[in-house]
């Protein structure tokens, strides 16, 4: 971290005079490629609503952790979210219901259980507000190290299985005929998304977390001509929105997560207009 702080001291930005802003900027540089990469997999795999359901399960896991007296309820949330993702994959593989129906069932159940546990015994809901809104300015050096490890693992997974996931999303029968283990691949991917969503919920906030997992790839899809551009633009848009959102939140005193999400929405609007012109 000392090297990063030294680099921040050389940059001519007033906000970097504060250590927490330096930490937040590094978090943005790590989350940009992380969310940009996952976003392409989520959009291609038509799992946008599922990522939202995972956010609800993460909140329920945090409530469980708080009730059990865990010093760090986030780890309880990670375990609960991964279990939620694995259970969803199991039910989906053995049900004739459509994916959106099952997502609605799991999502509503997770929300109801989370609110029930958070208010059980007349408990105050106020202590959970930080998980609803999020605050990237509160990220610590230890959490940054953990975020870097998660980013590395996701990039390795994307390198090894990215093309297989894309083929599975486009033509699952063809993927299966080529020996791709679709069930195992989707299970690992859903577990990875569950971990990322849970770890990021306190920095981004449950209310807008799904926008960071959908908007980068959705924007990239508007103007990309091939898969390489699709992945590149998704990561680039996530980085641009993260940096500009952090600056906007500093200058206007607004929520950093909301600022990032609004800029991503603006990027989507601009790229959609270019798509219409090009069409």
Image (cartoon, grey):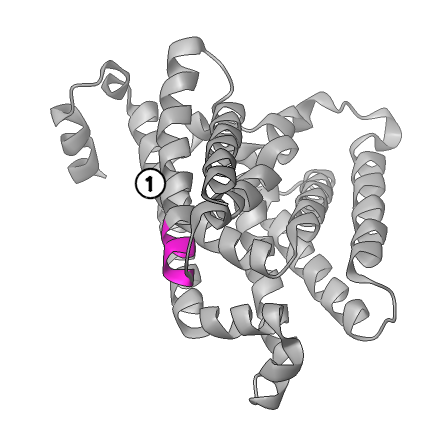
Task: Determine which quarter of the picture holds residue 1.
Answer: top left
What element does badge 1 sit on? helix
Query: Mark 1, residues whose alpha carbon is within 10 Å: few (<14), some, or many (≥20)?
Result: some
Main SS category, magenta section: helix
Question: What is the count of numbered marks?
Answer: 1
Residue, x 46% and y 68% (percent of image)?
162
- Which residue is at a point 83% across and 30% down the rendered structure image? 119
Residue displayed at 37% across by 55% down: 229
In this rendering, position of residue 228 left or right of residue 263: left
**Residue 19 percent coordinates (x, y):** 29, 24
Picture layout, residue 102 above or below residue 185:
above
Figure check: 57 above or below 19: below
**In the rendered view, does 86 fall on the left or right side of 135?**
right
x, y (%) of residue 120? 85, 33
* Residue 236 image point, x, y percent: 36, 43
Residue 92 position in % (x across, y down): 78, 68
The answer to whether residue 151 of the structure is visible from this angle is yes
In depth, the one of 174 and 29 nearer the eye is: 174
- The residue located at (41%, 32%) in the rendering is 241
Residue 71: tell me if it is visible. Answer: no
User: Badge 1 is on which residue?
Assistant: 29
Magenta stretch, residue numbers: 227-232
Viewer-side residue, 21 vs 239: 239
- Quadrant of res 168: bottom right
* Residue 181 lies in the magenta stretch: no
Which is nearer the eye, 253 or 43? 43
Residue sticking out furthest to the top:
252
Position of residue 204 relative to residue 64, above or below, is above
> In front: 90, or 130?
90
């Amino acid at each position: 971290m000392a090297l990063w702080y030294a680099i921040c001291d050389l940059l001519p930005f007033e906000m970097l005079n504060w250590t927490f802003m330096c930490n937040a900027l590094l978090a943005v540089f790590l989350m940009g490629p992380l969310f940009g990469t996952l976003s392409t997999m989520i959009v291609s795999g038509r799992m946008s609503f599922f990522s939202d359901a995972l956010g609800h399960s993460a909140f329920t896991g945090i409530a469980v952790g708080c009730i059990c007296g865990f010093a760090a309820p986030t780890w309880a949330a990670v375990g609960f979210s991964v279990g939620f993702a694995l259970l969803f994959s199991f039910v989906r593989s053995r049900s004739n219901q459509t994916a959106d129906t099952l997502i609605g069932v799991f999502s509503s159940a997770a929300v109801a259980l989370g609110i029930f546990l958070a208010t059980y015994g007349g408990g105050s809901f106020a202590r959970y507000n930080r998980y609803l809104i999020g605050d990237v300015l509160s990220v610590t050096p230890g959490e940054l190290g953990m975020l870097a490890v998660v980013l590395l693992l996701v990039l390795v997974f994307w390198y090894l299985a990215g093309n297989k996931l894309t083929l599975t999303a486009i033509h699952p029968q063809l993927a299966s005929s080529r020996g791709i283990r679709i069930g195992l691949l989707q299970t690992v991917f859903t577990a990875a998304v569950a971990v990322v969503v849970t770890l990021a919920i306190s920095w981004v906030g449950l209310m807008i977390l799904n926008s960071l997992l959908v908007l980068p790839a959705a924007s990239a899809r508007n103007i990309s001509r091939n898969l390489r551009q699709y992945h590149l633009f998704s990561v680039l848009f996530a980085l641009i929105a993260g940096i500009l959102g952090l600056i906007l939140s500093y200058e206007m005193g607004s929520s950093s997560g909301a600022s990032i999400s609004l800029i991503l929405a603006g990027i989507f609007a601009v790229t959609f207009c270019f798509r219409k012109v090009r069409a």
